[in-house]
Image (spheres, helix red, strand yellow):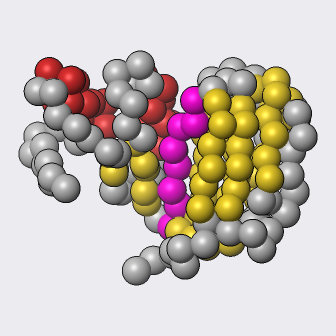
Amino acid sequence: MTDHYIDDELSLHTCNDHYIDDEFSLHTQVDYFVVLGAFGGRLDHIFSNINTLYEVQDQTTAPILLFGEGSLATLLLEGDYRLHVDTGLESEWCGLIPVSEPCTNVTTTGLKWNLEGQRLQFGSIISTSNTYDETGVVTITTDKPLLWTMGVKSL
């Protein structure tokens, strides 16, 4: 793991300019990016950080994990996902939010309220305030980018 600090510039967008672009130019293998303090109390900054997830989706295959104030968020692109939610670090809530465009076909397992080919979009239905069943594994299939968010325990 490598720590990077930017003294004079504090946005995730700036971090993208410095480090995510370098992943390819330096031919560096990155398993994932972790952004701490991503939900620092200002709604406009939260949306800016989520927007950056969408901006970099074609620049890296490494997941970007936003952490802050008891929450984690990451962008799930079109496809199938299997998430292990039995590490002991999860708190009890989770959600799936279609931020950029409607998702017309979302299916899940491992949640208390699963989705079966559900359409999710702002102004209609989004999946928030969900929780896990006892399996310890959540599967998600989505046809469009979808924000996964979940509670995490403080260490």
46 up-or-down from 94: above or below: above
The front one of 140 and 154 is: 140
Would you say residue 74 sits in the magenta stretch?
yes
> Above or below — where is 107 with respect to 3?
above
| x, y percent for residue 121 | 79, 29
Residue 94 percent across, percent down from the top left: 68, 58
Q: Looking at the image, which residue is at 70% across and 56% down?
A: 138
Q: Quadrant of residue 55?
A: top left
Please name the residue shown 13% across and 43% down the image. 6
Image quarter (top left, top right, bottom left or bottom right) of the N terminus: bottom left
Residue 134 seen by the camera: yes
Task: Check the picture and name the quadrant holding the C terminus.
Answer: bottom left
Left or right for 62, reference 138: left
Q: Position of residue 63 (x, y in %)?
A: 42, 41
The one nearer the camera, 130 or 10, is: 130
Name the side, left or right, on which 80 lies relative to 88: right
Residue 143 sits in which quadrant?
Answer: top right
- At x 63%, y 50%, the residue is 82
Q: Is residue 50 left or right of residue 31?
A: right
Magenta region: 70-77
User: Number of callouts in the render?
Assistant: 0
Residue at left 76%, top 65%? 131
Q: Position of residue 10 (x, y in %)?
A: 23, 42
Placement of 37 over or under 99, stated as above or below: below
Magenta stretch holds residue 118: no
Majority secondary structure of magenta residues? strand
